[in-house]
């Protein structure tokens, strides 16, 4: 196995002049190409799966230029694409990981095949739902996960128990649970049922840290049992009306407006059109009650309109009757 030291450089491409092209760390280059996050790329290098100009690497402390040829598992990594971002409505029951050692279904297994390779911005745990941002830019993913960005994550939690707004207001000072310090959280009691001392209620929470299972652990420390958790916004991007299982690409203009400060100018997308059209894979169980009770249109006789295929003879009587009933006054 051939490795490169921290100060080694790759061989110059034939025909290069005296001015060297810009160089960057290999993990950053592969992350921008959408291969994986920087941390995952370091694991791939340690496993001997990454090669630079035909030489297997043993360390990520390598700088590369645009002229260098990189391969992962023997597959040549193409040029970095402009940054792309997607809003995905994660349903409950999916793991936010590319490979799950327990064999559970993952978010990335459920994505449309025509999507580029993407990674998530942060995670949602197995039973959490709602907005999950996906991107082909590993550097952007890392930048948006940092609490220093100050981006608020907003959640709606359904919990069983009783609490008043006064106790929730104390979360603004932060809270320590089992030795873990959680930062300021803004929490608003939205809805509580009258009746028994223990009932479901809804709480809206806004926080900027996003530590592992933070919302669940903080509310449990207040005596509430969270039975549903939905992320409704991440920074300026909202879940909106996106159905569970649906994914939609964020437009280049929105990326330039909200993310130009964390994306290199060379990686910013141009134009104003998205390349991926929204696709919905909403499960039947998530249909609205109205949709469930509605009868299929084909079950009722339909009036003949010009341009339609002519109705069969056995339907003519029914169509004629319906036409007369529509003409008659109410």
Image (cartoon, grey):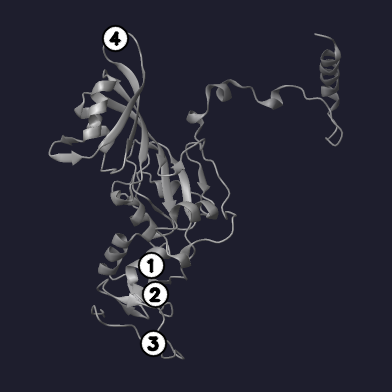
Q: Secondary structure at mark 1?
A: helix
Tell me the distance, in whole angstroms, between the alpha carbons under discs 2 and 4. 63 Å
> Is tag 1's residue or tag 2's residue first in the polypeptide sequence?
1
Contact (Cβ within 8 Å) of mark 2 with mark 3: no
Write down the residue under mark 4: 196
Write down the residue under mark 1: 30
> Is tag 3's residue or tag 4's residue first in the polypeptide sequence?
3
Expressed as whole percent of the image width and height from the top left, the position of residue 238 reads 46, 40
Write down the residue under mark 3: 12
Q: Secondary structure at mark 4?
A: loop
Looking at the image, is mark 2 or mark 4 nearer the viewer?
A: 4
Write down the residue under mark 2: 70
Contact (Cβ within 8 Å) of mark 1 with mark 2: yes
Name which quarter of the figure residue 261 lies in. Answer: bottom left
Residue at position x 43%, y 51% from top?
134
Q: Secondary structure at mark 3?
A: loop
Tell me the distance, in whole angstroms, between the alpha carbons under discs 1 and 2. 8 Å
> Is tag 1's residue or tag 3's residue first in the polypeptide sequence?
3
Tell me the distance, in whole angstroms, between the alpha carbons under discs 2 and 3. 14 Å
Up-down relation of residue 30 to residue 312 (above or below): below
Tell me the distance, in whole angstroms, between the alpha carbons under discs 3 and 4. 75 Å
> Is tag 2's residue or tag 4's residue first in the polypeptide sequence?
2
């Amino acid at each position: 196995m051939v490795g490169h030291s921290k100060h080694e450089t790759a061989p110059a491409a034939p025909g290069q002049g005296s001015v060297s092209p810009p160089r960057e760390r290999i993990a950053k280059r592969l992350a921008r190409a959408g291969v994986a996050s920087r941390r995952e790329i370091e694991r791939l290098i340690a496993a001997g799966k990454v090669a630079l100009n035909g030489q297997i690497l043993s360390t990520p402390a390598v700088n590369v230029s645009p002229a260098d040829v990189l391969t992962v598992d023997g597959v040549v990594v193409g040029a970095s694409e402009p940054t792309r971002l997607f809003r995905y409505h994660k349903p409950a029951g999916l793991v936010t990981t590319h490979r799950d050692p327990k064999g559970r279904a993952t978010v990335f297994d459920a994505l449309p095949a025509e999507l580029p390779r993407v990674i998530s911005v942060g995670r949602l745990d197995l039973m959490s739902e709602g907005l999950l941002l996906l991107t082909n830019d590993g550097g952007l993913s890392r930048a948006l996960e940092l609490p220093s960005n100050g981006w608020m994550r907003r959640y709606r939690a359904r919990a069983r128990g009783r609490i008043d707004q006064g106790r929730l207001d104390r979360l603004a000072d932060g809270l320590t649970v089992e030795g873990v310090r959680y930062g300021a959280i803004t929490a608003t009691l939205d809805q509580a049922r009258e009746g028994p001392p223990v009932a479901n209620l809804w709480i809206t929470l806004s926080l900027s840290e996003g530590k592992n299972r933070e919302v669940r652990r903080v509310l449990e420390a207040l005596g509430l049992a969270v039975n549903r958790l939905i992320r409704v916004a991440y920074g300026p991007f909202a879940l909106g009306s996106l159905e569970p299982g649906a994914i939609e690409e964020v437009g280049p203009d929105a990326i330039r407006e909200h993310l130009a400060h964390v994306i290199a100018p060379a990686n910013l997308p141009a134009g104003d059109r998205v390349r991926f059209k929204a696709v919905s894979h909403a499960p039947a169980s998530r249909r609205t009650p109205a949709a469930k009770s509605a009868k299929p249109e084909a079950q009722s006789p339909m009036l003949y309109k010009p341009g339609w295929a002519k109705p069969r003879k056995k339907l003519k009587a029914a169509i004629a009757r319906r036409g007369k009933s529509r003409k008659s006054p109410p």
